[in-house]
């Protein structure tokens, strides 16, 4: 069974503008200044996103993209390297589009950790802008090692490159996650940045919020009447959030990742943001503050993980050698830039609970890992089983239940009967939503089989799904903070994660590696929900 759009194809423009809404465009001239211009993020995400936005007609006025980096190169070489990277990503159909865009791309060599280079940067920006509308609107994107961000912002301010008191021209800074390393450092970073910037100039990015399917969580929940009444502890058994990656340490990631780990890298931000979107109450409006206020309430209502509970509620893992997608994969400790005795986790699974009227007692099971069997991100809401096991008589009274555990007559799995109903939001790949339920199998016996009703973006809407960074850059350039994090959200997420970091830091060292590359992580992750009550779905 397949759900298709009933109004015919929807263009990218209509989709991003919202039905009947005004076109979403950047109408003023601007300069996007990217610190960390020679890094992976710039070549793989930021420049391709700016290029697609420009090609799609989202920039109405002249613009410039200025990369700031330490390496020695000129504009021509920078453009050529980016052109190669963009072509590898298959973002360019015809060379002429790229050539037109590349004419607005510049490179400025500077050691941005040194204070004396900022006057030269100011001059260079002035020169570039003088032929392009000269408004001085600037977006400073921090694509650098997070450790450099405080100094870069301070020095930009020192050189008069932020305009804190005014909104014309506007100046904004985009800061990548993770925002800090723990609660204390996140608060200190915030205090530091807010000495030089106003809150409305500071865009804390979590690129998951820019994913079309993540935004669709809100659309699905609050734009339809049939499902939302089921989203509460009366009907929902538990929620599973999986972010699995087949890749290990790509590019030059190893050294940075080894100081971070999965909890800081993706759980504190991406996974908790997904949880907040699934669990939040309907916002008063779609305005930035109303949405963020509801998310922060959820994050503040997370039941704290006491240090004594860490082993029961959190499982960490690190991959050893194995096979991923048929190819041999080395273990984490053999990756470039990683310590040979590293105790950094490349996998984390945890059990969260939201202590409010809607969700009290409903487990939210979260997991993320590198070098898992495949790349898949999914949010699945599993509903409670029917109250009687009408269709599961053979397993009544004990024996193996349909979940494969030998759990006896009192087990909820056996007695409640049948496959659980599940609503799964597939964020990537194959973006879409599916509903699983039971149907009678054809034949003379009254036996049930699981079936799925599925909606896929690819089959239902026309045109490509915009990349997260396209949407977020467009919003930052327009000054719309809705899909960016407010400081209280960041703090609430760190407050939840902090005790786990402390327990890991102070406890005995982990026995790593404890899962082979190409498997679903350590076996203990399967028991997070307690007993056989809930096991991970096959994502
Ligand atoms: C980033 C993490 O935020 O998200 C990376 O730092 C991870 O470690 C990446 O690989 C995954 O993003 P996506 O969009 O490919 O799921």
Image: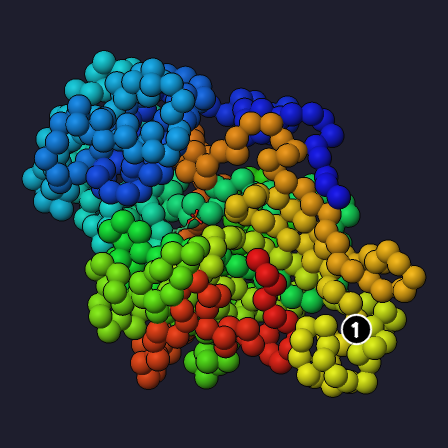
Residue 123 % position (x, y): 13, 26
Residue with the most extreme right position: 444
Circle 1 crowding by C-alpha within 10 Å: few under 14, some 14–19, many from 20: many
* Residue on which the image places disc 1: 416
Q: Is mark 1 within 8 Å of ligand 1?
A: no
What secondary structure is found at the residue carrying circle 1? helix
Q: Quadrant of residue 189?
A: bottom left
Q: Nearer the viewer, residue 165 or 91?
A: 91
Q: Quadrant of residue 337?
A: bottom left
Q: Nearer the viewer, residue 257 or 194?
A: 257
Q: Nearer the viewer, residue 149 or 191?
A: 149
Position of the N terminus, as image quadrant, is: top right
448 to 155, vertically: above or below = below
Residue in the image at 65% along x and 59% along y? 381
In the rendered view, does 156 fall on the left or right side of 204? left
Residue 201 % position (x, y): 35, 39
331 to 453, vertically: above or below = below
Residue in the image at 34% along x and 33% along y? 88
> Could one spot residue 185 in this view of the protein?
no
Residue in the image at 22% along x and 68% along y? 339
Residue 44 % position (x, y): 33, 39
16 to 207, vertically: above or below = above
């Amino acid at each position: 069974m397949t759900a298709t759009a009933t109004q015919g194809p929807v263009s990218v423009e209509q989709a991003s503008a919202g039905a009947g809404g005004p076109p979403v465009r950047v109408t003023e001239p601007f300069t996007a200044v990217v610190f960390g211009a020679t890094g992976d993020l710039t070549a793989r995400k930021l420049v391709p996103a700016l290029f697609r936005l420009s090609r799609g007609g989202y920039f109405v006025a002249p613009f410039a993209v200025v990369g700031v980096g330490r390496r020695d190169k000129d504009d021509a070489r920078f453009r050529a390297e980016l052109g190669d990277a963009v072509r590898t990503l298959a973002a360019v159909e015809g060379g002429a589009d790229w050539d037109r865009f590349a004419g607005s791309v510049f490179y400025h060599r500077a050691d941005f950790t040194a204070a004396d280079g900022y006057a030269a940067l100011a001059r260079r920006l002035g020169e570039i802008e003088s032929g392009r509308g000269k408004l001085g609107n600037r977006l400073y994107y921090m694509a650098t090692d997070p450790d450099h961000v405080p100094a870069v912002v301070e020095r930009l301010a020192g050189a008069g490159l932020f305009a804190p008191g005014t909104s014309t021209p506007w100046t904004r800074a985009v800061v990548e996650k993770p925002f800090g390393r723990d609660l204390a450092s996140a608060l200190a970073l915030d205090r530091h940045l807010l000495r030089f910037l106003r809150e409305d100039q500071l865009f804390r990015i979590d690129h998951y919020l820019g994913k079309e399917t993540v935004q669709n969580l809100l659309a699905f929940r609050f734009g339809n009447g049939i499902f939302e009444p089921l989203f509460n502890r009366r009907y929902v058994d538990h929620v599973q959030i999986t972010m699995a990656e087949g890749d290990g340490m790509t590019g030059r990631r190893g050294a940075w990742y080894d100081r971070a780990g999965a909890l800081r890298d993706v759980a504190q931000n991406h996974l908790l943001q997904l949880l907040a979107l699934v669990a939040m109450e309907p916002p008063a409006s779609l305005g930035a503050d109303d949405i963020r206020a509801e998310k922060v309430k959820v994050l503040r209502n997370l039941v704290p993980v006491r240090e004594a509970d860490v082993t029961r509620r959190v499982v960490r893992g690190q991959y050893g050698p194995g096979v991923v997608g048929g190819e041999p994969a080395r273990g984490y400790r053999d990756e470039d830039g990683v310590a040979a005795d590293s105790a950094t986790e490349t996998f984390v699974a945890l059990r969260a609970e939201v202590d409010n009227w809607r969700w009290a007692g409903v487990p939210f099971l979260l997991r993320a890992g590198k070098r898992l069997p495949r790349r898949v991100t999914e949010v699945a809401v599993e509903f409670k089983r029917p109250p009687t096991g009408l269709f599961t008589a053979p397993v009544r009274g004990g024996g193996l239940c349909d979940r494969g555990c030998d759990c006896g007559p009192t087990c909820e799995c056996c007695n409640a009967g049948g496959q659980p109903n599940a609503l799964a939001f597939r964020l990537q790949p194959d973006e879409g939503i599916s509903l699983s339920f039971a149907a009678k199998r054809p034949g003379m016996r009254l036996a049930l089989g699981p079936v799925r009703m599925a909606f896929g973006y690819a089959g239902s809407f026309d045109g490509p799904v915009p990349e997260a960074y396209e949407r977020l850059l467009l919003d930052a350039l327009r000054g719309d903070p809705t899909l960016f994090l407010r400081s209280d959200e960041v703090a609430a997420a760190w407050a939840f994660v902090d005790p786990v970091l402390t327990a890991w830091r102070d406890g005995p060292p982990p026995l790593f590696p404890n899962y082979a590359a190409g498997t679903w992580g350590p076996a203990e992750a399967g028991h997070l929900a307690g007993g056989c009550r809930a096991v991970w779905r096959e994502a």
